[in-house]
Amino acid sequence: MSRPIIVFTDLDGTLLNHHDYDWSAAKPALAALREREIPLVLVSSKTDVEMLALRRELGNTDPLVCENGSLILIPEPLLAPLGIEVDPRSISDHYYYDYRGLPREQILAVLNGLKPDYRFTGFAWMTDEEVAQHTGLSPEAAALAGQRKASEPIVWRDTPKAFEAFERDLGKRKLRIVKGGRFYHVMGRCDKGDAVGRLQQRYRHHFGATPFSIALGDSPNDLDMLKQVDAAAIIPHSDGSHLEDPALSQAYLAPKEGAAGWNEAVLTLITR
């Protein structure tokens, strides 16, 4: 019997093109995953409302990792197969919300306290139109991006030296900062990697065997996730540059950017 497979993927710049958020070039690989009944777990800095909308669009039925690992959503029908027993009060609209970070209100209180000392702005201080300008999203989609529960994206406008001090100040307050494709993300002491590790354990229960795990990403905030799996794939950026780290020396480098590169990487790795 062949070993079960599970795929974890970043979204922006990986499954979704960086500039237009299109995923149509990935359709052959998405169809292959469905045909082989391989779970595809979406892992992103996006909010739950953004990811639920995309999940419906993709016809995906697997768990979601939102806000860089700060929040995991498990569809209610998967709770028993994954061996998860929960308080019914933590189920909302047929999803179990597993909070792993700190509430956004707590994060914003810290950032407000640091604002006099550093130059930065976050979604909480922007209008939907300003978020749209920074992201390339429509104002309606930007409004969904602003509905955060456990993290805050920021635009850094200060010096690299000030950033080091800012990072230390966040650490003293039990927060961390990670770099995504467009923004820095301030969050609790969690990341995509430990959320993926948690789901790997759940799928081990589900399959009755340790699944072969694949992850795809393009940005520094994907690094913890890429280190967590059996096979990592790096999606390059439009200028040909790509994420580099000594831990990724064996990673598969996709030949193209965005959804087209994701498609080739998934088809290559699940065939291997």
Image (cartoon, rainbow, N blue to C red):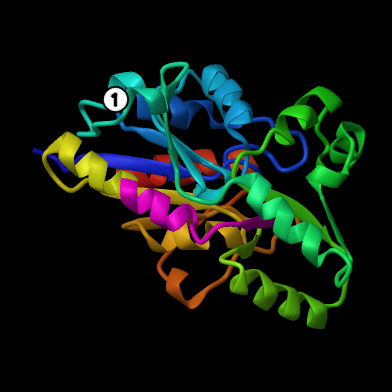
Q: Is residue 112 magenta?
A: no
Q: Is residue 76 visible?
A: yes
Residue at (31, 32) in percent of width and height: 38
Q: Which residues are magenta?
A: 185-198
User: In this view of the protein, which residue sits in the foreground, 154 or 34?
Assistant: 154
Horizontally, residue 51 falls left or right of residue 144, namely left
Instruction: Classify 222 as above or below 15.
Output: below
Structural crowding at the residue carrying mark 1, measured as other residues with C-alpha within 10 Å and reported as few (<14), some (14–19) or many (≥20): some
* Identity of the residue furthest to the left in this view: 1
User: In this view of the protein, which residue sits in the foreground, 140 or 217?
Assistant: 140
Residue 166, given in percent of the width and then of the height, sits at 74, 73
Residue 68, given in percent of the width and then of the height, sits at 55, 49
Residue 10: image quadrant is top right
Residue 221, given in percent of the width and then of the height, sits at 58, 58
Residue at (72, 52) in percent of width and height: 108
Q: Quadrant of the N terminus?
A: top left
Amino acid type, residue under disc 1 in the picture: Leu
Q: Is residue 189 magenta?
A: yes
Instruction: Classify 161 as above or below 96.
Output: below
Q: Which residue is mark 1?
A: 78
